[in-house]
Structure formats: structure tokens, C-alpha cells
Amino acid sequence: MKTTMFILMLGLSALTGFSKNKASSGFNEEIEKKAIIESITAETENFFRNDYEGVIKYYVHADYIFHAWNNDDGTYQTTIGWEAISKMFKDYIGDKPVQAVSTSHPIVKRQNMIFKFYGTNVAFVTYDEYNSDAEMKNFYHCKAVRIMEKQDGLWKIANVTGYWDYKNLVPFESVK
């Protein structure tokens, strides 16, 4: 019983210390959430516009970063480490010209965003993502996860995980 009580007190002390550290550092979760959303949005927009330099600005360049998703044929793809992820983007974008706007997925919506901050420089984010088809008749739905790191004042992606539902398209007018 004493051991359990000690562990609980230690845990509460750590949580209280973390909250005080965030508050004393001027950390504002609402401001940081907005900044994270801006980074995630900019990365996606640049990807669909074929802007390699615009994409890589929003990634952590380290050997531990991770990219994973499923494909419409039932397979999945994982890529680990900055060198491999950078190559993946270069191979996908290739020599395609940078576009002013996305034509493949002109509308991307994110809903049900949940944030968990681990200190002031790491965040775990889950959400639903809806990417429209080119004709803007339907959306593809994804359950998404991002692990974000704040580096030099900018929130960057350390992990992308996406589970796409390619069979059950969502009618365009049903996503608000």
C-alpha cells in the first residue's frame, strides 16, 4: 500500500511539475495546436502540388522518422529514416512541375483532431482526414496519426501513419 501511494504521489508530482514547466515557459496549447495544423496543412498542400522543397521543410530530417500507409490494392508501405523518405518524395514527385493548386485532391478536410503534448516540443495528433477526388464528387477517408517535433520554432513531422478506406467513398456533400 505504501509503495502504491508513493508511486501515485511521484506520478502526480511529475504531472504537476510538467504543467508548471509548460506554464512557466509561456507554452500555450491552443497556439501550438494552430501551428501544428498549419504545418500539417502546408505539407499536404505542397505534396499535392508536387513541391518537393515545400514538402521537406515540414519533416524532421533524422534516421528515426517513419512513414506508413495502406494502398488501395490492400498492400501497405512503410519508409523509415530521412534518406529513404526524401528519396520516396523525389521518386513520387520526379520532374512534375510545381502546380499553383492541387488537381488530384483539390479539397482536404481534417476533423476530430486530438492532441497530446509531451513537453513543449513533441505532440501526438490523431484525426480524420478527407481528401476529395479530382471531380469533387467523393472523399477518401483516412484515420491519421502524426507525431510532431518543434524544431527552430516550426512544428515538423516525425511520423505519418494513415489508414485509408478506399472501398467506402464518402459523398462530397456529407463532409462539412
Image (cartoon, grey):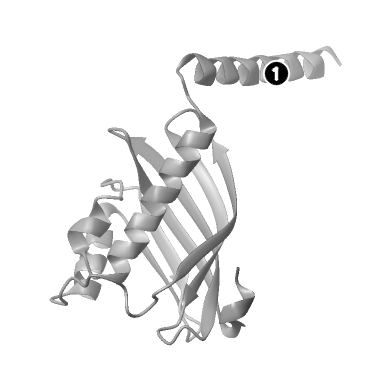
Query: Vertical placement of 2 versus 87: above or below?
Result: above
* 7 on left or right of 44: right
- Residue type for callout 1: Leu
- Dot 1, how many residues are within 10 Å of its Cα: few (below 14), some (14-19), or many (20+)? few
Question: Disc 1 designates what residue?
Answer: 12
Q: Secondary structure at mark 1?
A: helix
Residue at 53% x, 36% y is 30
Residue at horizontal 43 percent and vertical 87 percent from the top: 135
Count how many numbered circles sit on residues in the image: 1
Q: Nearer the viewer, residue 150 or 3?
A: 150
Q: Residue furthest right?
A: 1
- Could you say which is closer to the camera, residue 125 or residue 46? 46
Relative to 123, residue 80 above or below: below
Reply above or below: 4 against 117: above
Assign the N terminus to one quadrant of the image: top right
Q: Position of residue 138 (x, y in %)?
A: 53, 83
Where residue 21 appears, x then y in whole percent? 51, 16
| Residue 142 at x, y percent in the picture | 54, 69
| Quarter of the picture holding the C terminus | bottom right
Residue 158 appears anywhere in the view: no
| Closer to us: 141 or 62 | 141
Q: Position of residue 41 (x, y in %)?
A: 39, 57
Q: Residue at x 51, y 21 (%)?
A: 22
Q: Give the residue at x 47% y 77%.
A: 132
Question: Residue 151, can we see it?
Answer: yes
